[in-house]
Amino acid sequence: MIGLKAAAKSVFIYVMFGTFIGYGALCHDLGFSLTWALVSTVLIWAGPAQVIVVTALGSGLSAGEAAIAVSLSGIRLLPMVAALLPLIRTKATRFWQLLLPAHLTAVSMWVESLRMAPGVPPERRIAFCNGLGLGLMAPTLVATVVGFMLAQRLPTLFAAAVLFLTPMSFTVSVARNSRELVDKLAFILGLALTPVFALAKVDLALLIGGVLAGSIAFAVHRLKEGA
Amino acid sequence: MTATVRDLGPYLALVLVGFLPNEIWRVLGIVIARGLDEGSELLVWVRAVATAVLAGIIAQLILSPPGALATVALVVRLAAVVIGFLAFLLARRSVFIGVLAGELALVLGALMWP
């Protein structure tokens, strides 16, 4: 319940409502059913991956290529889940109890959980994260329906504005969570290095840039701790 | 590999192309989390990598954006994200103000430089 309340107060509710209006409209324009659009949100629950899947059908991309593109965008989920779960589990936690919070892990839920879970009693943190994740997911389903219904009436500029919500909200919410030097450095280096690798046409630019930027930030953190 | 998403049927495609390639990372995250202690230095590194990968996704969404966002000039997209970030700092780290200012800057910029 406290998780649901935290979701209701999260600025991500508004951001994701807008984002998923865009997603619902995209599904409509590319010929998917409303049911498919809703099921895809529940199953995938990761904005960039969902956009890749629906556009893959429109462009006739091969299933293999589309799956690889989705998988590349999903790599971020591994370190996110690995960083979150040690904060919310206790010694009594079973493996299956971690499946739901792991599935609900997306940038929005992750950012809010890392910020708020430490203030929740340890034995209630998993329930908190589940409430938070489901509380964020429910409005996106409503937004998907709204976007699907309004699809034909949305102007291009509105579509551009809702697509811009994702990078803009990621930027400020990650910046808010980056209070320690290691996180700030990782954020700045990730912003700077990944485009360099992408421009140089390095395969897996996101992965290589992320691991390198994160590791440099960590090395600086260790040097400062040691000194 | 040559089958298109359309050949698979929409729900099979959703599971094979959308759900599984994405969910595998979450499950691997659970497995790796087993070896990590709260407060360990390894966890600091994992969080740094997660933050950096996320920053990389932001950079890609701004520099080579999907769909309709590509119709807005690059300089407007870059300026809007900087303005949003500055507003966030000025408003004592308010995410809401930051997003609002960035969105306003994007829409005004797109109207002025179509």
Image: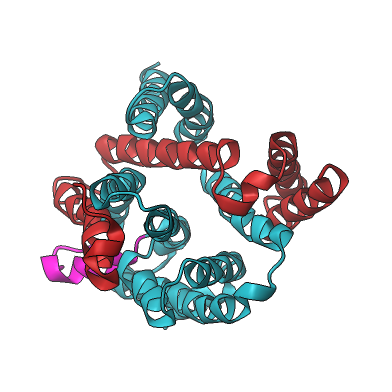
Chain colours: A cyan, B red
In the depicted structure, whether residue A75 falls above or below residue B17: above
Camera-nearest residue between A37 and A128:
A37
Prevailing secondary structure of the magenta residues? helix
Camera-nearest residue between B91 and B82:
B82
Camera-nearest residue between B83 and A118:
B83
Residue A37 can be seen in this image? yes
Residue A151 x/y as whole percent: 60, 74
Residue A92 can be seen in this image? no
In the image, what residue occupies the spot 63% across and 60% down?
Answer: A162
In the image, what residue occupies the spot 57% across and 66% down?
Answer: A22
In the depicted structure, whether residue B64 falls above or below residue A74: above
The boundaries of the magenta stretch are A88-105
Q: Is residue B34 left or right of residue A200?
A: left
Residue A10 x/y as whole percent: 56, 68
In the depicted structure, whether residue A191 falls above or below residue A124: above
- Give the number of callouts: 0
Q: Is residue A193 magenta?
A: no
Residue A65 x/y as whole percent: 28, 45
